[in-house]
Amino acid sequence: MTWMQYLAPLLKGAQITVIISLASIVLGTILAFAAGIARTSSNPIVSGIAFVYIVLFRGTPLLVQLFWFYYALPLIGISFNPITTGIMTLSLLTGAFGAEVVRGALLAVPVSQYEAARALNFSKTYTLWHIFMPQAVVEMMPAFGNLAVQNLKDTALVSLISIADLTFQAQSLRNITLDSATVYTLTLVGYFIIALGLMLIVRLIEMKLRRGAAFSRSAHS
Amino acid sequence: MMYGYEWDTSSTLAFATSILPILGIGLLVTLQAAAVGYAIALVFGLVLALLRRSRIRAISWTVACFTEFVRDTPLLVQLFFLYYVLPDFGIVLPAFMTGALALGLQYSAYTSEVYRGGIDAIQRGQWEAATALNLSRFQTYRDIVIPQMIPRIVPSLGNYLVSMLKETPVLSVVTVLDMLGLANMIGERTFDYLVPLSMVGLIFLPMTLICSALIHLVERALPKSGIPLR
Amino acid sequence: MTSIIRFQNVTKRFGALTVLDNFNFEVQQGEKVTLIGPSGSGKSTVLRILMTLEPFQEGKLELAGLSYHEPNGRGTFKASEKHLHKIRSNVGMVFQSFNLFPHMTVMRNIVEAPIAVLNMKRDEAETRATELLRMVGLLDKKDHYPSQLSGGQQQRVAIARALAMRPRVLLFDEPTSALDPQLVGEVLGVIRDLAREHDLTMLLVTHEMRFAREVSDRVCFFDKGRIVEQGEPEKFFTNPEQPRTREFLSSILNT
Ligand SMILES: Nc1ncnc2c1ncn2[C@@H]1O[C@H](COP(=O)(O)OP(=O)(O)OP(=O)(O)O)[C@@H](O)[C@H]1O
Ligand SMILES: [Mg+2]
């Protein structure tokens, strides 16, 4: 087998990696917004639940979470297929880290914006979504870009719960060919290319957001 | 039975307590791996950061690409790479060392960025002032650069220590018997993964929280009067 | 004439600091009142309480016949959000630092609240916004973002934004203090025009004494949470009674 022949299985694995990564980034982002907003809530129960979720998932290793959902949870009668388990765990982790990003960006919007919104009699919900969020989201983008790449890297762990992702395919190839150097180099390059793609997507979204909100371009200071 | 400790599966609580000593042995391995890995990351990251500032384009450019590549690819695959490829070149290390090396390598890519940010935050005028005062390059670093860098970089470096601690369980994949490795083994033998895995999570949680709190304390205790941190 | 604003023995504290101490103050419908006083005397606090941005601890406050809250001594708004909403629909505020929404164009800054809060149709809101922008002389800037405007222009937009909600009471908290001197005039010009509106009640905090004299029906000198002296601007500025007032006026006129 030459390295060209390694490409077919690796590409197949890369597809799974991309799917899992994108799915868990999207779900994780939704969770991040839900938990991040809940954290800023004045209702102690709502912010308390969000706090526990964030601490729990940020404070424990992903691999432990993954094995826990995969091996331990079925023992109390709850089981999902590996792909679902993988996407769920990664989403929960990305959501927990993203929640802190969302919360930080919301808290960074000046209080004066809140006061202006209140003076104009906007409701709390309207103020959150139409005044605070558009300003905060732009600030979140760089951090979310990092989280996306982190998420991609973390997907490699799902190979350990028998999902045939890029890492899993690399392992199988190595077992057959014993050509470790070539297989793992190709795999690393594969991840790097996907990471570049992810960063590009995040940049494009950020540029679009910034254009939609020309406010960052300060003509007057 | 493992390391001479029997487990007691009569009840969940008894099981949990009976495996604690075994997990404790794993915890030691976890902490050692993190310590060795972190030491590598601190030193090698600094080397990378300094090479990155090299006036020779080829060096700074290569180092920039290398760090970016290492930052953007999974630790697990890097670990496999070292674990399977190094022996091909005649370098045979124990699994623990390979694991610590992988951790250190990945995190040196992060720490090098931290160092770089710390150095870059020092204004150009300061370097010029140091030159004007006829300080040697060594004196400039010792008396001007490093004292200003430390309060700027310690918080980020500390956060990476916590992150690294949470990534050590990956080493169990290459047969290192850290906490997770042992928990998995107990799970295999008793067919009960719930208790050992939950225990590992429960041990990690206070550990990372305490670590974060300690770093926060160190951060606050650092002398930083007069140094603009942002 | 009926009072539209009535403070009765209002006490406001920030922790141990008492900012308003048994404060009594009334403003008649359509009256233009200027508050002057040294820094930290509590002028902004009066406006912020009226705008429901700050709670107060004791006393009674009414605006357009609506009570702010039955005091419970704990400094919390006892009135429901819904009730506060009703109060706020009578008041508008112009802030020292404009506080425009940076992510919205000038036009959207103005029409957003009428559409979202008053359920006005977009066409109607835009027609009205166009009128207001013409009034403040910024119609050509309607598609600009706040960051593309000068401070004076931003403040004029902020005034138009507040007016779009058709408040009965308009509060100005040092509307020109954040502006470069050469931009102050354009903003004062707009406020001067507004002061001709018979029905609009205006409460203005400013350090522009000449302007205060020109536009207000009444000037109040405010110090340490109390009104030390008040009266018609002519008399107030030419012949103040209290030594404290004289001292303040001379200190401000000499700088
Ligand atoms: N949120 C707050 N927490 C604590 N103290 C406050 C707060 N807001 C205002 N104060 C204090 O209350 C006092 C009155 O403040 P206020 O802003 O009303 O003064 P002002 O008359 O508007 O002064 P200036 O001319 O400087 O704007 C000041 O001593 C101020 O420090
Ligand atoms: Mg003030």
Image: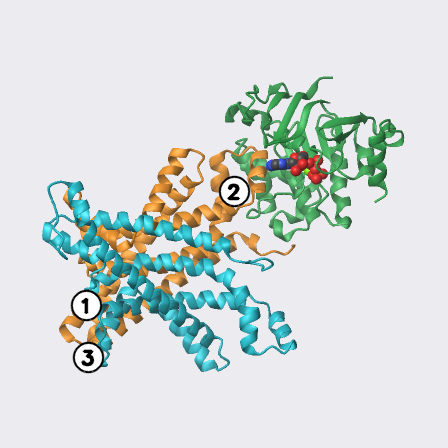
Q: Which residue is mark 3?
A: A2
Q: Chain of mark 2?
A: A
Chain appearing in orange on the rendered image: A
Task: Please tell me whether mark 1 or mark 2 is closer to you in this view.
Answer: 1
Which badge, 3 or 2, is on the more N-terminal residue? 3
Q: Percent x, y for residue A18?
A: 29, 60
Chain appearing in green on the rendered image: C
Which badge, 1 or 2, is on the more N-terminal residue? 2
Q: CA distance from mark 1 to mark 2?
A: 49 Å
Q: Which quarter shows the N terminus of chain B? A: bottom left
| Image marks 1 and 3: residues in contact by CB distance under 8 Å | no
Q: Residues within 10 Å of mark 2 (few under 14, many from 20)?
A: many
Left or right position of B46 against C32? left
Q: Which residue is mark 2?
A: A131
The reply to whether label 3 and label 2 mark residues of one chain is: yes
- Amino acid under disc 1: Gln
Query: SS at mark 1?
Result: helix
Query: SS at mark 3?
Result: loop
Q: Tell me the residue at 13%/55% (across/down).
A: B4
Q: Tell me the residue at 51%/57% (across/down).
A: B222
- Amino acid under disc 3: Thr
Q: Which residue is mark 1?
A: A171
